[in-house]
Image (tube, rainbow, N blue to C red):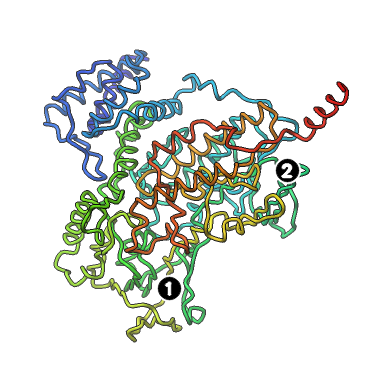
Amino acid sequence: MTVASDGGRRERLAEAVDSANIPTLLMVNTQLTGDLGWLSERYRPSPTRGLEDNDTGDLPADVQAEVRTAAVEAISAWQAGEPPAIPTPSDELMVRMLSFCMGDEVPDEYGPMLADDLEQALRAFDEEVPAPATTSRPTPSDGFRVLVVGAGISGLCAAVMLQRLGVEFEILEKSEEVGGTWREHQYPGAGVDTPTHLYSFSFAPYDWSQYFALRGEIFEYLQYVASEFDVRQRIQFQTEVREAAWDSEAQLWKVDVQRPNGVHETLEANVVISAVGAFNPPVTPDIPGVDRFRGPAFHTARWPDGLDVEGKQVAVIGNGASAMQLVPAIAGRASSVKIFQRSPQWAQPFPKFQQKVPDGVRHLFQEIPLYYAWYRLRQAWIFHDKLYDSLQKDPQWPHSDRSINATNDRHRKYLTKYIQSELGDRTDLLDKVLPTYPPFGKRMLLDNGWYRCLTRDDVQLTTDSISRVDPGSIVTSSGDVHEADVLVFATGFDITRFVSTMEVRGRHGSSLRETWDDDDCRAFLGMAVPGFPNFFCLYGPNTQPGHGGSLITTVEEQVHYLEDLLRQMLDSQIAVAECRPDVYDRYTKQVDERHARMVWTHPGMRTYYRNSQGRVVVNSPFRNLDFWRMTRNADLEDFVTEQRMADQSRDVQHEETKS
């Protein structure tokens, strides 16, 4: 490399570092130089507030400049071949470093998980980083095959694992492309409410253009993963799974699929992995007269291609996450937007909504693995377990109608002030939008301009119930008539009925739906159910990290567990693994006991987290740390196992010969 090119590279690095996150740079400096002085009081960032990145750390300008200058020197030396002085920080140092850069006290018990997260993030950049010993390939028995149902986030994650494991597999996808939810949701404003650098597979970093990506970019990312990891060739598109039935004698699943031409075919597999997701199918309320509406009427998940709302009167039924994204995106284009609300929602500030990632920072994310890894670790702490303790009920708390403990009450006061400030002089809206239930009792939403949008003259919020729909209007219980050209249902999904898109029959022909009494879904680690051998759910019951976190992280942890389980089965010539009933019951009891102490069982609200019996079936009651520990290794003692039939026959013949 010439001196000129070295200079250009350094100049570009300096420009990138100028817009970088200071707390993250401090960690890069520490690890590259080995100088723990970067963890001294002079450089201590202020505590991170809410969901903010705390880009400057609230440090004086001269200290920031010192950090940036040192980062350019350290990174340049690393680019020139100087290895990091601390390539693998100890668990204790990981805790110390994250505590420092967050301005928060991270408990010591998080050390192993933080070290593992750092290692995983760095491995994604460097193929020469030694892989763990557990990634040695087993030798699958002849004909061993896995079928994965669904090519969304969970299905792609499972596919990458199975490919790494060297197992024969196919993905069955009912649509014509990968992406799942992110393929289907094309309504204006659709996007993610988890930081995109966290809403990414640990093994697949990406050049994200926004801190919180919109739907199109997430869909492109999933297409990229399918191609980059060479799993697209394993996907059978436009193939819908109608039924999967276990054959005990053959130790196989018989899977009935329907091809694009309508023809049915039966496939066989040793293992079936359900990756059908939870936000499926959409739910549309049964309102009298809906079928007589003369304009477009559809669920947000079925937004028509080419629909233009310019100059139209749009009626939106519902005010959850989808509505909160949709309404600000179409207000001002439509002639009017009328929102029909059943109950108010809490929403918190969204500091980096629609903010582009600066080009320099994108360069750092792509070229400096340590910067990417530490930024991701900081995001994980902001969005993961930090909130968990404040969601526990305090039996001595005197204001249980409005909050569940002192911290939760402070959240309520803070969010109330925020909502008031966003509404400004529109105090007439307060009674309509201010919830009475404790914060985080329902899914906490991120405010992307929702409250300010409600103050517009062309936006109307109605809290009266809907009596009927006429050909060109909606009539409420008060008798008011609201004219509409377009009717949008932002009414959510049938989330509590997991694995509802196919019939699954286990031993003795029992169906999963019957086993779960329709919507009382439960599974060991959200994956395994007694009576259904070699059948595993991803993003199954009680796996959504409701207190904060990334769905992708949860799915990766489940897939990690499955990889270890399959490896042990193959190494030991085990053909069947079925969750033991006592393990299943003990796990379910633990889930329910924990939920009884958490905000999601508070009686003051209705939430999709709970089924028709009031049991929480969607959210996980565990910390992300707890679930990480549970999924590190599979214990075959938790399963009833069977060897291959052929092996059993040989054993019998051997015994007969001996006798």
Q: Which residue is mark 2?
A: 252
Instruction: Classify the position of the N terminus by image quarter.
Output: top left
Tell me what residue is drawn at x 28 percent, y 71 percent.
459
Which mark, residue 487?
Answer: 1
Looking at the image, tell me whether mark 2 or mark 1 is earlier in sequence order.
2
Q: CA distance from mark 2 to mark 1?
A: 46 Å
Quick one: which residue is furthest to the front in this view? 659
Crowdedness near tag 1: few (<14), some (14–19) or many (≥20) residues, C-alpha within 10 Å: many
Tell me what residue is drawn at x 60 percent, y 52 percent.
176
Residue 640: x and y, percent?
64, 38
Crowdedness near tag 2: few (<14), some (14–19) or many (≥20) residues, C-alpha within 10 Å: many
Q: Nearer the viewer, residue 338 or 385?
A: 385
- The label nearer to you, 2 versus 1, is 2
In the image, taking residue 607 as reference, residue 265 lies left or right, namely right
Whether residue 348 is visible:
yes
Label 2 residue SS: strand
What's the amino acid at mark 2?
Answer: Leu
Q: Nearer the viewer, residue 324 or 534?
A: 534
Residue 325: x and y, percent?
35, 59
Q: Nearer the viewer, residue 27 or 530?
A: 530
Q: Within the image, what quadrant is residue 500 found in?
A: bottom right
Instruction: Classify the position of the C terminus by image quarter.
Output: top right
Q: Nearer the viewer, residue 71 or 497?
A: 497
What's the amino acid at mark 1?
Answer: Leu
Label 1 residue SS: strand
Position of residue 311 relative to residue 242, above or below, is below
Which mark, residue 437?
Answer: none
Residue 401: x and y, percent?
26, 62
Q: Within the image, what quadrant is residue 417 found in?
A: bottom left
